[in-house]
Amino acid sequence: MIKLGKDIFSKIVSVAVAAVMVLTLLPGRSVSAADIDLSKKGSMTVIHHSADDEPLEGVKSRIYRVASVDASGKYTVLDEFSGCFSDSSFFNNGYDFDAWKSCVDGVKEYVKATNVKPYKEGVSDKQGKTYYEDLDLGVYLVISDNLVDKKFVHSFASFVYPVPLLERGKESEVMEWVYDVEVAPKKESVERIIDEEFVVYKRWSDSGYESNRPSEITVKIYCDSSVYKTVKLNSSNNWKYSWTYEPGHEWKLVETSTGNNYTASLSKSKDENKYTFVFTNTYNPPETPPGNPPEDPSEPVTPDLPSVLGAIRDLPEVLGARRLPQTGQLWWPLPILVLFGVFFIFKGIRKNSKA
């Protein structure tokens, strides 16, 4: 929505009237005003208001002295701006306000292209006024920057203006030179569309298991069900990504890679026009059966054997046997016991034969 200022044309008309008054200064014309006092300094107050005529504080502006003036009111373009005009007496060519206005864009481009330094710079106060004092007399180009607030972008037209200005006296019909002038540039205020701000963070809940974190994770950002962007979060970007976008859209974030044994949860918050998404990845250690410590792969594993005594089964060669002794039983005494048994049997037989 564009709001046009109430006095867009009022100032233009006033300057036009002043320009018509200045026509009397052309050579050969009789004037009722005295000559310009070149020993004086002038001043210019630039008034910056919104389209609703509310004072605007903080508007930056600059003025450039484009032409000088002599006692009779004749203007001469300064050498610094001679490249803008084919005729150094441009501002004397009929004192046509439309001609003055038509030169503004060209002078602005010239200032930008040649990096001409401003004569003075200023910032508007709470009343929307910028005061330029102690000015050499002549013609000035005034350029104001845009001012952006929470609701509007306020812009101002550039213009040229003379110091002093020939006006009719307040208490008489005599024309007189006014050395302290006030002027308000044409303005407009355009409603601002404020972009919303978004940020996504990655948080880790894995105390003691930090080494298990992946080097990066991938997040897909959806705007109105369509993929807006796929981003990677890692230590180089501090596990963070931010963006701005115009309001009125629905956003959804999906983490497509969480890391081994991690589960991801998403929280969302809003502060004015800023949205914050936080992915928290929680580590889930693998479960270990009670009483059975994790196997050490560096140690050989002995296969399970049945508890039945004397069971026959295939065993690794390193065991050197196919019959497994019972717990606490030793094989090496067995041959000795057999020999002792045979010895005692024979001894008993001999003893019985003697009897």
Image: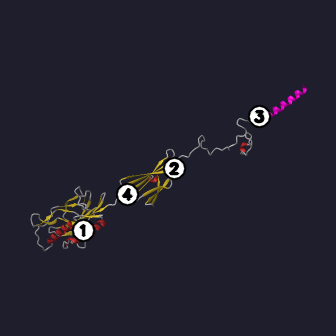
Q: Which residue is mark 4?
A: 196
Q: Which residue is mark 3?
A: 333
Residue 340 forms part of the magenta stretch: yes
Secondary structure that dominates the magenta span: helix
Q: CA distance from mark 4 to mark 1?
A: 49 Å
> Where in the figure is residue 45, as x and y percent of width and height?
20, 60
The 10 Å Cα crowd at callout 2, few under 14, some 14 to 19, many 20 or more, is: some
Question: Residue extending furthest right?
Answer: 354
* Residue at 14% in and 71% down: 24
Q: Label 2 sits on what residue type?
A: Tyr
Q: Which quadrant does the C terminus fall into? A: top right
Q: Label 1 sits on what residue type?
A: Asp
Which picture quadrant has residue 200? bottom left
* Residue at 81% in and 34% down: 338
Q: Which quadrant does the N terminus fall into? A: bottom left
Residue 233 forms part of the magenta stretch: no
As helix, strand or loop, the secondary structure at mark 2 comes to strand
Q: Label 3 sits on what residue type?
A: Pro
3 and 1 marks in contact (CB < 8 Å): no
The 10 Å Cα crowd at callout 4, few under 14, some 14 to 19, many 20 or more, is: some
As helix, strand or loop, the secondary structure at mark 1 comes to helix
* Residue at 72% in and 42% down: 319
Vertical comparison of 68 with 220: above or below:
below
Give, as a single range, the part of the protein colored magenta.
335-355
Q: Which residue is mark 1?
A: 79
Q: Label 4 sits on what residue type?
A: Glu
